[in-house]
Amino acid sequence: MARAGCRVSRPHLDPRLVALVAVGGMVGTTARFLLSTSLPHTEGAWPTATFLENLVGAFLLGLLLETLVRRGAESPRGRSVRLGLGTGALGGFTTYSSLALELERLLTDGAFVIAAAYATATVVLGLAACFAGVTLAARRAGADHPTSPAPGAGPTVDGPGAVR
């Protein structure tokens, strides 16, 4: 319960932020649909489209969130970017439900080795992809280590989305 006079942030009730997530979700879902239709899945085979969607999404989410963290305290613009691109677009692009359904189908088809390899590779390589995104953002910010803030007052911005 909030104390009297304290402002409680409730972004899930802000229609502008909800709209950003919705629009981002439409963009991400459309991108996932286009990739999925360009790499159709064959029963009993490795689900390439979903695998790529989740790995690319993990990399981009790591890159995005580390970049935003390195900019300092979250501003209204930073919150909008995080919600629109992170929660919306990348949330719509990546798909845990398709991963689960494809694993169920592989198991039902008797493709136990492919299912185990797919589940393991998705988690392990997804973590590696996320770490690669975080590491790239840290290097772009001039830090030697992803968890160390860049020395000085913070990163400099040279243009839209460019952080050094």
Image (cartoon, rainbow, N blue to C red):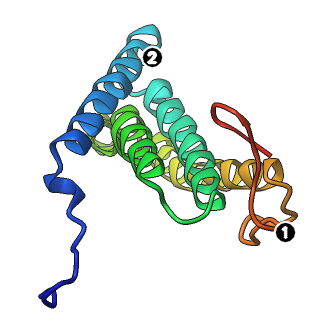
Would you place residue 144 above or below residue 125 in this image? below
Q: Residue at x 50, y 26 (%)?
A: 48
Give the quarter of the image for residue 55. top right
32 lies left or right of 53? left
Which residue in the rendered view is the most extreme toward the front? 5
Residues packed near mark 2 inside 10 Å, few (<14), some (14 to 19) or many (20 plus): some
Image coordinates for residue 150, horizontal then vertical, percent: 80, 65
Q: Which mark is residue 60?
A: none
For the residue labelled by badge 1, is the local secondary structure a helix, a strand or a loop? loop
Q: Residue at x 57, y 46 (%)?
A: 64
- Given the image, on which type of amino acid does mark 2 rest? Leu
Residues packed near mark 1 inside 10 Å, few (<14), some (14 to 19) or many (20 plus): few
Q: Residue at x 35, y 39 (%)?
A: 95
Q: Which residue is mark 2?
A: 35
Nearest the viewer among 15 and 23 is 15
Nearest the viewer among 45 and 72 is 72
Q: Residue at x 37, y 39 (%)?
A: 84
Q: Which residue is mark 1?
A: 151
Mark 2 or 1: the one toward you: 1
Would you place residue 144 above or below residue 77 in this image? below
Give the quarter of the image for residue 99. top left
For the residue labelled by badge 2, is the local secondary structure a helix, a strand or a loop? helix
35 lies left or right of 17? right
Real-space CA distance between mark 2 and mark 1, rounded to the nearest whole angstrom: 40 Å
